[in-house]
Structure formats: C-alpha cells, structure tokens
C-alpha cells in the first residue's frame, strides 16, 4: 500500500513530483516524506493512493476525505489482521450507515461485534442453512413436514433483515451485538503507528542460524544502551554480540535503505545511529540532502559525511529546476507572459544554471560543495597570474 503526497502550493508546477510513501510507515518515515514533498507542519496537501489496497477499501476511500495519519493507521491495522478479520471488516464497512473516515477507523475496533460465514452469497443460501440447521426460533414451532414447503429465499431475506446482515465478495456478514465502540472522534487518532521505536533497528540471530529459521532472533533498537543490550542478549540466550549476526536491518528513512544490504558490524551501525541521533532536525535535513548529493552507497561513506556537513551549502527552498529558472529570468526583468517564453524550456535553463555553479537539486533541496582550501588557493593563483599578465 502506497500513497503519493503533494503540497498544494506547488500544484501548478508540472516539474513538481511530490513524494511517495509505503504504508504502514514509521513516524520518522512520515516526517521524511513530508520533507521530500516540501511540506511544513500545517500546510495543505493532497494525496493519491497506489500499490495494492484491497478493492473493498479502495471503493470506500474514493468517496471519503482522509488524512495521511488516517490512511497510515488503516494500513497498519489491515497489516495486522488475519484473513478472517479482513473478511469481517469488508462486511462491517457495508453495514455502516454512513461511510466517512471516522466510521471507517471505528470499524477497525468493532470486528468482534460481527460474524462472517464464507461462501454464503444469496438469500437462498441463508434460508437453506437456516432451515437445515433449525436456526430460527420461528421454525422450531413448525412441524418438520412443513419445511420442504418453505421458500428458502424468503426465509433467508427475513433472517438477513433481522440480523442486519450484508453480502460481501466472499460471503455473508452479520451483527452479533448491537454495541458499537466509538474510539475515534474524527480528530484525535486512537493510536499512533509505531512499527519501530527508533530510526534504525537490527534483527539479530545467533551465528550459524539458517536463513529459513529467523524466528529465533530479536530486534535491537539503535543507538542502544547497556540495558537494551543486556535485554536483547538475554532474549537470544547469548553472552556477547560476538556470537550474533545481523539478519535484517530496518530503517525508517528510505534514503538509507541502500545501506541495509551491506555487511557491517553492530558497533559500526550503532556509531552511525548515535551520530544521527545527536543532530538537530535542521542538521539531519541537511545531512539527508548531502547524502543524496554524494550518492551515498556505503555505511562507511555515510558515517564520514556526518563529520563533513560544514563543507556543503544547503538551500531547502529550491524545489524544481523549472521554478529556479523562472525565478532567475524574472529577477533579470524578463516578462514570462510574452509569446517568446511560451515554449521556453525553464527546466533545462534551471539545470544549466545549477551546473554552472556546481549545485545539484536533491529531494530535500539544493546542495553545493564549498571549495576546499587547495581549490581556493588555485583560483587565487590563477587570478593573480592573469593580473600579472
């Protein structure tokens, strides 16, 4: 399940692409997606859904206004459901007197108030089942020789209306309780999606564990402290991390996913996580932009970049090359509404200006590298040489 996020303020910019987020998502991943979409807290945005959403959910969402938080919680609860619970939930949504996101969310917390019968697809099926099993109290008062004369479709319709039941794509769903739990008021979500507690998590298993037998492992949240280290080792029944290996790496930031397939030690991951956790939000945003600028592909390179941020200039305001090209032309006094600019390649012009200044546009903003001391000295020498000539 995926969602595309777009800032309303850039809706008219054809080069603006927003950001994509896989759901359910860690809160850190949600924050990162908003940053890539160039959204600040409180600013308006709109969403497009993609990936695989169950058909019965998609048809409901098409008619409902929803926030990213609501979609994330919905995706999280769906990911936790059994096949039978999903079948019940489809029926719950059909029973709802009004379909809005408030009730869609509340329905997730009321599954136990419904029952589901797979394969029952029409009133005749309900009637036949009811007569054969003598399920309705009214039937018990009739002599058995009357049963063959009963209209199964009418009996089924009567039972369905009495139970407030509905047919779904997989069977028949009906209420077993008139109670309804209102956990969501349409404003404050009943729970936050916290798949993991930190930006990085390592799934550790004892050395020698076969790839198909990873159920014996334990998650270690990074950066870890001595207490969490002891707890994980106790869970694994081991004395030291020397007897562990990393089976999985989870990161809440998509930019770092390319680092997770590398063979790195626990301490190296922990040192990197500690460096990131010590950064301010502003520093972390710049770091992610610089990591993309440098096409960071290894944990060693990623760690080195944390100590070299002052060598880069970061401008989070820049969104697209086309916008930058337009701004530069307008600053020079050009009237972009004239016929001469009707088919002008603003994006290509913006890219050319960027290349001239050594800048690149990342998902987080524009980045350029400060010239090193040797480069500055070389430039100064060239200027002096030209002056002497």
Image (cartoon, helix red, strand yellow):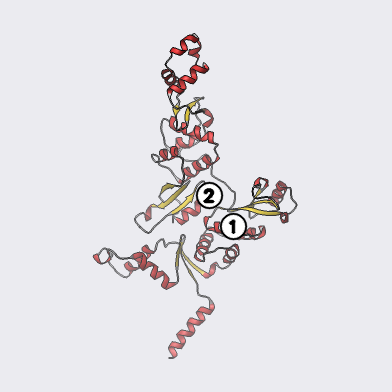
Direction from residue 286 to residue 356 in the image, left or right: left
Q: Is residue 296 visible?
A: yes
Q: Earlier in the sequence, mark 1 or mark 2?
A: 2
Quadrant holding the C terminus: bottom left
Residue located beneath label 2 in the image: 27
Residue located beneath label 1 in the image: 261
Compared to 59, does 295 lie above or below? below
Q: Out of 20 and 227, give the one closest to the viewer.
A: 20
Q: Which residue is the extreme one toward the bottom?
A: 389
In this rendering, the count of numbered labels is 2
Picture residue at 46% right of the left edge, 52% below the top: 20
Compared to 218, does 293 lie above or below? below
Picture residue at 56% right of the left edge, 68% below the top: 308
Compared to 65, does 384 lie above or below? below
Picture residue at 45% right of the left edge, 71% below the top: 358
Q: Residue 47, image x and y in percent?
A: 41, 48
Which numbered dot is residue 135? Answer: none
**Crowdedness near tag 2: few (<14), some (14–19) or many (≥20) residues, C-alpha within 10 Å:** many
Q: Residue 106, image x and y in percent?
A: 49, 35
Direction from residue 231 to residue 200 in the image, left or right: left
């Amino acid at each position: 399940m995926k969602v595309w996020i777009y800032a309303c303020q850039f809706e008219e910019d054809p080069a603006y692409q927003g950001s994509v987020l896989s759901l359910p998502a860690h809160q850190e991943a949600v924050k990162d997606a908003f940053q890539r979409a160039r959204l600040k807290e409180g600013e308006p945005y709109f969403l497009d859904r993609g990936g695989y959403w169950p058909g019965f959910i998609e048809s409901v969402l098409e008619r409902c206004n929803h926030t990213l938080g609501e979609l994330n919680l919905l995706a999280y609860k769906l990911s936790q459901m059994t096949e039978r619970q999903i079948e019940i939930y489809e029926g719950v949504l059909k029973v709802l007197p009004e379909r809005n996101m408030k009730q869609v969310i509340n329905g997730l917390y009321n599954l136990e108030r419904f029952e589901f019968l797979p394969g029952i697809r029409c009133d005749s099926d309900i009637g036949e089942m009811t007569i054969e099993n003598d399920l309705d109290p009214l039937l018990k008062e009739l002599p058995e020789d009357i049963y063959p004369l009963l209209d199964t479709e009418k009996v089924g319709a009567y039972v369905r209306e009495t139970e407030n039941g509905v047919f779904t794509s997989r069977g028949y769903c009906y209420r077993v309780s008139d109670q309804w739990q209102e956990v969501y008021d349409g404003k404050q979500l009943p729970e936050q999606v916290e798949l993991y507690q930190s930006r990085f998590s390592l799934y550790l298993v004892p050395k020698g564990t076969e790839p198909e037998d990873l159920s014996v492992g334990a998650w270690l949240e990074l950066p870890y402290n001595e207490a969490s280290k002891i707890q994980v080792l106790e869970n694994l029944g081991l004395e030291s991390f020397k007897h562990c290996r990393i089976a999985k790496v989870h990161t809440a930031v998509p930019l770092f996913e390319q680092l997770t397939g590398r063979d790195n030690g626990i301490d190296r991951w922990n040192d990197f996580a500690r460096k990131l956790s010590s950064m301010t939000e502003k520093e972390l945003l710049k770091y992610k932009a610089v990591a993309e600028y440098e096409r960071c592909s290894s944990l060693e390179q990623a760690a080195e970049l944390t100590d070299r941020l002052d060598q880069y200039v970061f401008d989070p305001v820049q969104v697209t090359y086309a916008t930058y090209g337009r701004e530069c032309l307008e600053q020079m006094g050009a009237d972009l509404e004239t016929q001469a600019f009707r088919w002008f390649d603003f994006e290509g012009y913006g890219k050319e200006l960027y290349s001239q200044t050594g800048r690149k546009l990342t998902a987080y903003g524009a980045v350029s590298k400060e010239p090193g001391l040797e480069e500055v000295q070389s430039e100064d020498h060239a200027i002096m040489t030209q002056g002497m000539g």
